[in-house]
Image: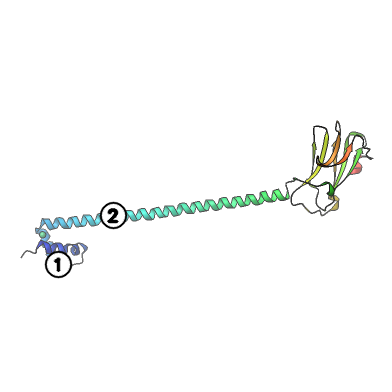
Amino acid sequence: MKTSCELIRDLLPLYYDGICSDTTKKIVEEHLAECSECSLILEKMSVSLKSTNSVRQESEEKIFGGVAKKWKASLCKSFAKGILLASLCFILFYAGRYGLCQANFIAADNNVVDTTEYTLKDDANNIAVVLETTDGYLGGTIVSETDEKGNVYLSIVRPIIKEKNRDKDNLRVVYTVNIENKNAVYYGSPDNRELLWDKNTDLPQIAYEELQ
Ligand SMILES: [Zn+2]
């Protein structure tokens, strides 16, 4: 008696997965040998299962590949950000330290600078100014500016964070000013100045060597 196609088709998934008994397997195979319709169903079944599997695999690869790529990219980004931030901190630290401790741009006020002026022996074109800071910090740099009227403005400029003086002698700085065609020499700025020399001033005379 020929087993009905309906029964075989119910068994085909078990047969395909290889989870039926040997007897069932034999019955299915005998039927398939004679029945092209059921054979075709088995063939279709295997093709559709295979394609489902490959589609699933592809999409998994896509998802995980994408996640990995994104993760890698974000890791690279974070790393670059970290490097950038570290360099920025480094630059800011050194720029800040330089700006605060080394760059001279704060002029020392008249009241913390004592000056003594001399005319130089055998040198009618220059006067000598001895500048001394009295607030216990180092002198910094002396800057000299001349305006269009021939007025010379001297000032001691220092960093924001001044360096404490350790040796009192360092506070004394000698600066020579050329007075050819000059009107006057001041300490300070046009708004806050102290006269050091003008044509009517008689300064004590000194040899340059005596100032050292
Ligand atoms: Zn059949």
User: Where does the image place residue 177, in percent across and percent down from the top left?
Assistant: 85, 37
Give the residue at x 36% y 53%: 62
Q: Quadrant of the C terminus?
A: top right
| Three-letter code, disc 2 | Ser
The residue tagged 1 is 24
Which corner quadrant of the figure contains ligand 1?
bottom left
Q: Quadrant of the N terminus?
A: bottom left
User: Where does the image place residue 123, in percent across and percent down from the top left?
Assistant: 90, 34
Q: Observer-nearest residue: 148 or 19? A: 148
User: Where does the image place residue 199, in percent across and percent down from the top left?
Assistant: 90, 34
| Three-letter code, disc 1 | Thr
Which one is earlier in the sequence, the residue at label 1 or at label 2?
1
The residue tagged 2 is 54
Q: For marks 1 and 2, give the CA distance.
A: 29 Å
Give the residue at x 14% y 68%: 23
Give the residue at x 12% y 56%: 37
Q: Quadrant of residue 60?
A: bottom left
